[in-house]
Amino acid sequence: MYKIAVIPGDGTGPEVVTQGLRVLEKVSKIHGFSFETKMFDFGGDRYLKTGKTVDAHDIADLKQYSAIYLGAIGHPDVKPGILEQDILLKIRFDLDQYINLRPIKLYNKAFCPLKDKTEEDIDFVVVRENSEGLYKGLGEFKNKDTVDEVALQISYNTRKGVERCIRYAFEYTRKRNKRKTLTLCGKTNVLTYAWGLWQRVFNQVAAEYPDIKTDYAHVDATTMWFVKNPEWFDVIVTDNMFGDIITDLGAMVQGGMGIAAGGNINPQGVSMFEPIGGSAPKYTGKNVINPLAAICAVAMMLETLGEKAAAENIENAVIKITQTKLSSLSAGKMGYSTSEVGDLVIENLAQ
């Protein structure tokens, strides 16, 4: 019995979560496991009504669950940064979800914006440190609102935080067992303190994994190679901000936000899984948003929980309908409604 905390969230979040839960219900019957869910109303509507985001009691409650399934956070009537900081980042930090895991996998070459790239060329994973760096929120203003104003934003990196992320990436590369190559993505030539630490720890941990090939690429070069030669990559490990940037580019390379799912992972605790495309408020209630990213997030959740066969079943169904049914991965252009895409996935699950 898995206990799943569900945060439908804002905008189109509830619509895509509904389809993900339908797929979860069906695949659980096929593969013989059970689950129960509890809905949490964290998001913009709750904040506008009550002024509440997420507090210590909410975090304590979430710790009792096997996993968290998130739709989206982001409301047009709430000032940017409030919901992101006080809900998303608070959950990630307080539950110590120190890994953000982003598979970049192309399911249909027709939806790839890159010329002459096939499904075999785009199949890699980004391991992003998820609890430190510039997103720690450390900094200050000096001489604010004067001509001498200085704004300081601190990239906070601890050896413990860096090492556990890098070690996770090496273990993941070994488990993935494909090209068995781990690339460190950074900026060692300019950001010499933070990336000096990352590079040293990476080299030291690499000595413990002689079966894993390693290399390094500056972050700007990485974005170039994502476009020119994505087939070079197997697993990439990087910090919080660089990971945030390159995974959005990765989403475009794999066909768009409609297919991109991610996991916020605590290997020893409660992890959270989500589509990465955001709340897309302009599509709310129109039944046109692509739910496949949210459905792929269910597959990631099940794989992390140990239900590998169920996860593979979902992914195979998504691949099949992406290759044979959908005319696009964009909202309103799929040839099917949100709920009909959910139907297609369910119909194509192997029995």
Image (spheres, rainbow, N blue to C red):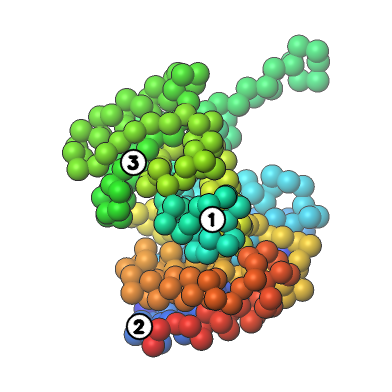
Quadrant location, the N terminus: bottom left
Residue named by callout 2: 31
Residue named by callout 1: 254
Q: Secondary structure at mark 2?
A: helix
Res 58 visible: no
Kind of residue at badge 3: Leu
Kind of residue at badge 2: His
The image shows residue 4, relative to residue 206, as above or below, that is below
Q: Mark on residue 182? A: 3
Which of labels 2 and 1 is toward the front?
A: 1
Kind of residue at badge 1: Gln
Expressed as whole percent of the image width and height from the top left, the position of residue 279 reads: 68, 60
Circle 1 residues within 10 Å: few <14, some 14–19, many ≥20? many
Horizontal side of residue 168 vs 349, given as left or right: left
The image shows residue 78, relative to residue 294, as above or below, that is above
Expressed as whole percent of the image width and height from the top left, the position of residue 86 reads: 62, 49
Question: Do callouts 2 and 1 mark residues in contact (Cβ within 8 Å)?
Answer: no
Expressed as whole percent of the image width and height from the top left, the position of residue 187 reads: 48, 26
Q: Residue at x 30, y 48 (%)?
A: 179
Question: Do callouts 2 and 3 mark residues in contact (Cβ within 8 Å)?
Answer: no
